[in-house]
Image (tube, rainbow, N blue to C red):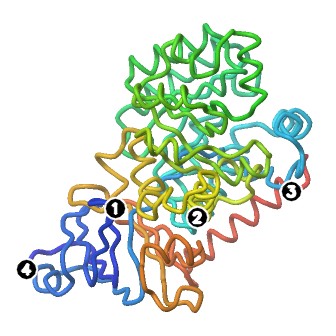
Amino acid sequence: MRKVDTLIESRWILPIVPKGTVLHHHAIAVENGRIIDVLPAAEAQARYEAIERVELPNSIVMPGFVNLHAHAAMNLVRGLGADLPLMDWLTQKIWPAEGKLMSPDFVREGSYLAGLEMAAGGITTASDHYFFPEDAASGLREAGLRCAVAGIVIGFPSAWAKSDEEYLEKAEAFIEAHRNDAWVRPTIGPHAPYTVSDHSLEKCAEISDRFDVPIHMHVNETAVEVSESLRDHGMRPIERLKRLGLLNSKLVAVHSVHANASDIAAMAEAGASMCHCPCSNLKLASGFAPIAEFFKAGVNVGIGTDGAASNDKLDMLGETRLAAMLAKAVASDTTAAPVHDMLEAATLGGARALHWDDEIGSIEAGKFADVIALDLSGVECLPVQDPAAQLLYAADRTCVTHTWTAGRLIYSRGDSPAIASQCEKALKIARKWQNRI
């Protein structure tokens, strides 16, 4: 018998690849942080001797969620500016608060707090877009997550950088430092078309090409963004990004609420990805992204939570459920956004957008063992007629019982000294920042 580190045996396994597959009574063998085999549980017990055997008779095991868009440190400003429109929310509440609080400690501790929340909800990878990327990466890694972190570029001074040139220099240095990091994948992060100049956008495109890293950017988030782009540049945001060299297979266009047919066609032709953040879009009344149209055009779709200040929770399963139902309503078509397409978007779709799908996003031999388990034995999920459908439409993030990254357990439901220690630290961080705005 071959010795392995862990054998995870489950009632159901949702591998994502091949799409639509649900494996019954199967096991995952893990060695040195990677999946080495997926096979029937009875065969696994005969073939492998495991240091740790995890038996999950009522659970579904799947790849960890890939949160394609987050501002993790914004957990520390959760709840600010409820009921305000996007630009009022930003200018009256968020940007003033960030101006007062922004520091490496703020970002590191806020990101750690967010990382704990994400791990408890089955998120194993977060793509972050915020200031002080080294500290964001540090906080997320301390919580056990894998992360893609943006070197942000924005057209106004902050505690992170004072000029366009400084933003670009610091972003490039961050990318250089992590270009071979298995846990931290750097991206270039121009904030949005309306906050970044043509010159800086061209430089971001050049950095993306030179280092072969994704471009993580808010695009087509509001109707005002589109109308002002037409007024100021004579073209829509996607047209402008194409002219400046950013519309390609490395672009992750976050929100894309107000993308029209020509935008979607251009993104499909370029191989770009879109990131859908439905809760944030609804709370800020930004609108309804045409997800069914993106799927029809063949655009890669991922799911993101956005930051806790505009959501207000980092719940990928809830986000994906809402995305599926909104897509059906917007398209007036119950067949839009099928279950397996949506679960793929929440996992492998995000990994593809980050060009990380060779390592994460599905349960396949050779990939990192970034996997989660959800207990479907609660009364809200019973009886289990269709495990995938009931995972999406009946379960919620409280059903997550285990979260592993590279085979290491970073969250488990129930009492444990490690979880108690994390909760104590989280409370200290929350109290520290509670009344400083």
Would residue 357 appear left or right of 248 to someone viewing this image? left
Q: Is residue 286 above or below residue 390?
A: above
| Pick the front one: 206 or 231 | 231
Give the quarter of the figure containing the N terminus. Answer: bottom left
* Residue type at the position of mark 2: Arg
* Residue type at the position of mark 4: Met
Q: Distance between the residues labelled 1 and 3?
A: 40 Å
Residue 201 percent coordinates (x, y):
58, 15
| Pick the front one: 121 or 221 | 221
Among numbered discs 1 and 3, the one appearing first in the sequence:
1
Secondary element type, mark 3: loop
Contact check, label 1 and label 3, Cβ < 8 Å:
no
Residue that carries the numbered disc 3 in the rendered image: 434
Among numbered discs 3 and 2, the one appearing first in the sequence:
2
* Residue type at the position of mark 1: Ile
Secondary element type, mark 4: loop
Among numbered discs 2 and 4, the one appearing first in the sequence:
4
Secondary element type, mark 2: helix
Residue that carries the numbered disc 4 in the rendered image: 1
Identify the residue at horizontal 55%, vertical 43% (top origin): 275
Residue that carries the numbered disc 1 in the rendered image: 16
Residue that carries the numbered disc 2 in the rendered image: 321
Residue 413 percent coordinates (x, y):
54, 80
Among numbered discs 3 and 4, the one appearing first in the sequence:
4
Secondary element type, mark 1: loop
The label nearer to you, 1 versus 3, is 1
Would residue 427 appear left or right of 254 to someone viewing this image? right
Among numbered discs 1 and 4, the one appearing first in the sequence:
4
Contact check, label 1 and label 4, Cβ < 8 Å:
no
